[in-house]
Image (spheres, grey):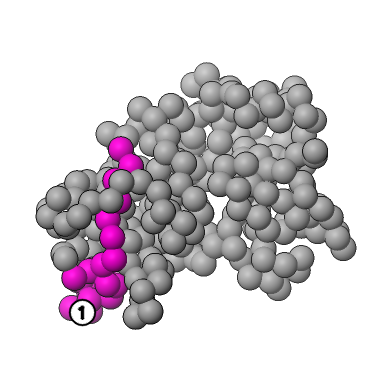
Amino acid sequence: MKHGIALLGIIPLRKESSHRSELVSQLLFGETYELISTANNWSMIKCSYDDYEGWIDHQQHHALSERDYLLLSEAEAGIALDLAFTATSTHRAIPIVAGSSLPFFDGMNFKIGKEKFIYNGQALPSDGKATALFERVAMRYLNSPYLWGGRSPFGIDCSGFTQMVYKFCGVVLSRDAYQQAEQGITINFVEEAQPGDLAFFNNEEGKIIHVGIVLKDGRIIHSSGKVRIDKLDHFGIFNTDTGKYSHLLKIIKRFF
């Protein structure tokens, strides 16, 4: 079995093996994957973090030995908190974004294989102790533009946003909103919701199409046009700019 790691800040993950194909997700620096197949200078991969599959440009593939992959899988990692910061080694300087993984991070240094990097930005451990800081992390993404398939502060979709915030909290969420709705513990009434819960929203056919993070005082932070804060009640999300409901509430789930 062959594996790889993202050694670029952001790597597009596409539905098909073409730059014109739909963006379905992104790999952030330090995230690993399984190499499934190759075709026409493209690689079909499965992301280690959420088992999501898609195609990356083979020029952006960086191979990992089985030994290094296992070591990285078991390693404690820091998670970059700065919106953008440069990690440097003796061989390269790589701009990385919030949510990137820093294997074997000691507060200033991390390593991938034999290559050692220096990272002087802010980072949090991936041990789940950041659950109390979820709102601080979420606010880092405020006003980030909406991007279908995005997972970075410079373009992110609704489920990418919740997945990245929860990554800091040590909770692994699936990639898409409907998949995330299958996780967690159901909360029966919006009045029982607590900050950090996830609220899911459906379309007229009942299909879950949107997700956001519950805040205190009847508010929700979510990615819709941009990462924004709106009002939440038993009916759904009330957009404070338009004065109208934008999403219909389906279910609320608790994860920590």
The part of the image, by quadrant, that contains residue 149 is bottom right
The residue lying at 76 percent from left, 65 percent from top is 17
- Pinpoint residue 119: horizontal percent, then vertical percent: 55, 29
* Residue 222 visible in the current orientation: no
Magenta stretch? 235-256
Query: Above or below — where is 229 with respect to 129?
Result: below
Residue placed most toward the observer, 25 or 28: 25
Residue 4's x, y, as percent? 74, 40
Does residue 194 lie above or below 105 as drawn? below
Percent from the top left, x then y, of residue 97?
52, 45
Q: Which residue is mark 1?
A: 244
Q: Assign the C terminus to one quadrant of the image.
A: top left
Asked if residue 231 is among those painted magenta in the image, a careful observer would answer no
Amino acid of disc 1 = Lys
**Of 204 and 242, which appears nearest the observer?**
204
Q: Examine the rendered structure and indicate whether residue 158 appears above or below residue 197.
A: below
In this orientation, which residue lies closer to the viewer: 238 or 143?
Answer: 238
